[in-house]
Amino acid sequence: MTRDTAVQWLWRWINDNQEATIEEGNEAFEQAKEMEKLDIMDAWKLGNLSTYLGKSTTAENYYNNNFKKE
């Protein structure tokens, strides 16, 4: 069994909730962003990028440094 990506989940949510309010859509979008963040952090942990990068960092710091744009 495969798991949906955040984009796949959001696309299905949009199609299944076509009568949703803007607020509900924004909440779904924020949930998808959180899912993507967790996926990126999991990938970082599995890949052990700190060794590859030659420096010690946490998955949270890696995500914030490379993907957090707010």
Image (cartoon, rainbow, N blue to C red):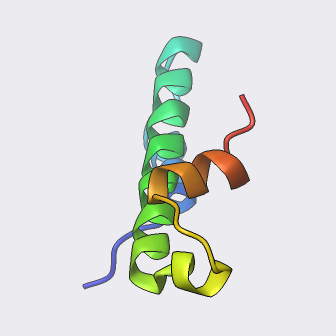
Residue 24 at x, y percent in the picture: 47, 20
Residue 5 at x, y percent in the picture: 48, 65
| Left or right of residue 32, residue 22 in this image | right
Residue 38 position by quadrant: bottom left
Nearest the viewer among 67 and 11 is 67
Q: How many marks?
A: 0
Residue 29 at x, y percent in the picture: 55, 34
> Where the C terminus falls, by quadrant?
top right
| Left or right of residue 55, residue 31 in this image | left
Q: Is residue 60 above or below residue 44?
A: above
**Residue at 66 percent of width and 79 percent of height:** 53
Nearest the viewer among 38 and 26 is 38
Q: Is residue 31 above or below residue 35?
A: above
> Where the N terminus falls, by quadrant?
bottom left
Query: Which residue is situated farthest in the left direction here?
Result: 1
**Residue at 46 percent of width and 81 percent of height:** 48
**Residue at 40 percent of width and 73 percent of height:** 45
Res. 9 in view: no
Residue 44 at x, y percent in the picture: 49, 72
Res. 17 in view: yes
Q: Is residue 12 above or below residue 31?
A: below
| Left or right of residue 19, residue 3 in this image | left
